[in-house]
Image: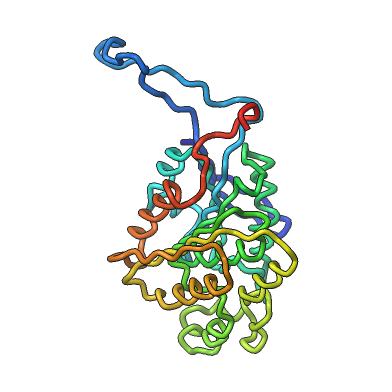
């Protein structure tokens, strides 16, 4: 697995931003014949299989980090690199700070950065397929809501979305977000909430009202993502996640909701479910895409 962290000046954000990219690299395999016959100083000789080729592309999963994290923490606290290599898929994690991935009411447009500028940068600099069927978005904690909101706002970008434990930020229940903006708890512990989402009286029907956004895009005839939501049975945000799952189902989206028994709001949950998403839940090709084959 290759790994690169780079920094560039985002025109959309108006400042420099860090991006971590992990991508599959060449692999080796044991000979299909009797491997035990091929020995050199007691070591098995591995046959090299051609991997890189002109025009090849990878499917890409944009992986959003949680609140208080950065673009590196996911790869230090989980085995996401190993899971990506095993499934021959690129992972892209931008540092989105504590932005909730939103085009802030008072602040910078992180959702526009994520859904418009970042894919263009990644597809220009790396062998990332531009096809919608080859692009996915996933996140955990705050990043789960970031992924959910991005996929509902720009369903033409992503084939599927995985929201792990995303119980804070934008939601399909605008009244819930409105109540959070009015609560003393959120004012005290999430001081960026008001700056990000603005006045509670203006939330319903705004760009932060994900149900309204989804219905607007459906009326416009945009394609729709598949959604997979997963939450630990012990998580404090479980009720909010179940509410989003219920509304997605009522709206008729292709979706699944998973309750992870015995899991809490922590990296044990996110490590295991990033693995499950890459291994089974996402409709990945799990191979590089070669021009002559595809």
Q: How is the image coloured?
A: rainbow
Q: How many marks?
A: 0
The image quadrant that residue 174 belongs to is: bottom right
Q: Nearer the viewer, residue 193 or 139?
A: 139
Q: Residue furthest left?
A: 42
Please give left or right for residue 264 compared with residue 182 in the image: left
Q: Nearer the viewer, residue 219 or 19?
A: 219
* In the rendered image, the vertical position of residue 51 relative to residue 204, given as above or below: above
Residue in view at x 59 percent, y 65 percent: 101
Residue in view at x 58 percent, y 38 percent: 58
Measured as percent of width and height from the top left, residue 21 is found at 54, 44
Can residue 138 be seen at all in this image of the molecule? yes
Q: Nearer the viewer, residue 125 or 277?
A: 277
* In the rendered image, the vertical position of residue 214 relative to residue 61, given as above or below: below
* In the rendered image, the vertical position of residue 262 relative to residue 175, given as above or below: above
Please give left or right for residue 275 compared with residue 217 in the image: left
Q: Quadrant of the C terminus?
A: top right
Can residue 40 be seen at all in this image of the molecule? no
Measured as percent of width and height from the top left, residue 158 is found at 61, 54
Please give left or right for residue 7 compared with residue 22 in the image: right
Residue in view at x 33 percent, y 70 percent: 233
Measured as percent of width and height from the top left, residue 201 is found at 65, 89
Residue in view at x 26 percent, y 11 percent: 41
Measured as percent of width and height from the top left, residue 263 is found at 31, 65
């Amino acid at each position: 697995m290759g790994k690169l962290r780079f920094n560039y000046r985002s025109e959309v954000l108006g400042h420099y931003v860090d991006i971590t990219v992990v991508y599959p690299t060449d692999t080796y395999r044991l000979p299909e014949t009797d491997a035990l016959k091929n020995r050199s100083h007691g070591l098995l000789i591995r046959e090299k299989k051609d991997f890189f080729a002109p025009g090849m592309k990878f499917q890409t999963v944009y992986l959003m980090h949680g609140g208080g994290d950065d673009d590196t923490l996911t790869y230090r606290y989980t085995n996401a690199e190993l899971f990506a290599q095993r499934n021959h898929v690129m992972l892209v994690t931008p540092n989105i700070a504590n932005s909730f991935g939103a085009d802030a009411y008072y602040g910078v447009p992180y959702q526009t950065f994520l859904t418009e500028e970042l894919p263009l940068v990644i597809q220009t600099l790396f062998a990332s397929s531009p096809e919608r069927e080859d692009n996915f978005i996933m996140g955990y904690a705050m990043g789960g809501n970031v992924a959910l909101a991005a996929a509902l706002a720009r369903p033409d970008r992503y084939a599927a979305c995985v929201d792990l434990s995303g119980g804070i930020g934008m939601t399909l229940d605008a009244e819930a977000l409105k109540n959070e903006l009015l609560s003393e708890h959120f004012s005290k512990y999430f001081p960026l909430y008001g700056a990000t989402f603005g006045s509670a009286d203006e939330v319903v029907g705004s760009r932060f009202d994900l149900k309204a956004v989804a219905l607007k895009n459906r009326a416009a005839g945009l394609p729709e993502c598949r959604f997979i939501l997963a939450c630990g049975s012990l998580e404090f945000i479980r009720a909010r996640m179940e509410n989003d799952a219920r509304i997605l189902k009522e709206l008729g989206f292709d979706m699944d909701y998973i309750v992870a028994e015995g899991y809490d709001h922590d990296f044990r949950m996110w490590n295991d479910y990033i693995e499950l998403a890459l291994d089974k839940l996402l409709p990945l090709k799990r191979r590089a895409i070669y021009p002559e084959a595809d």
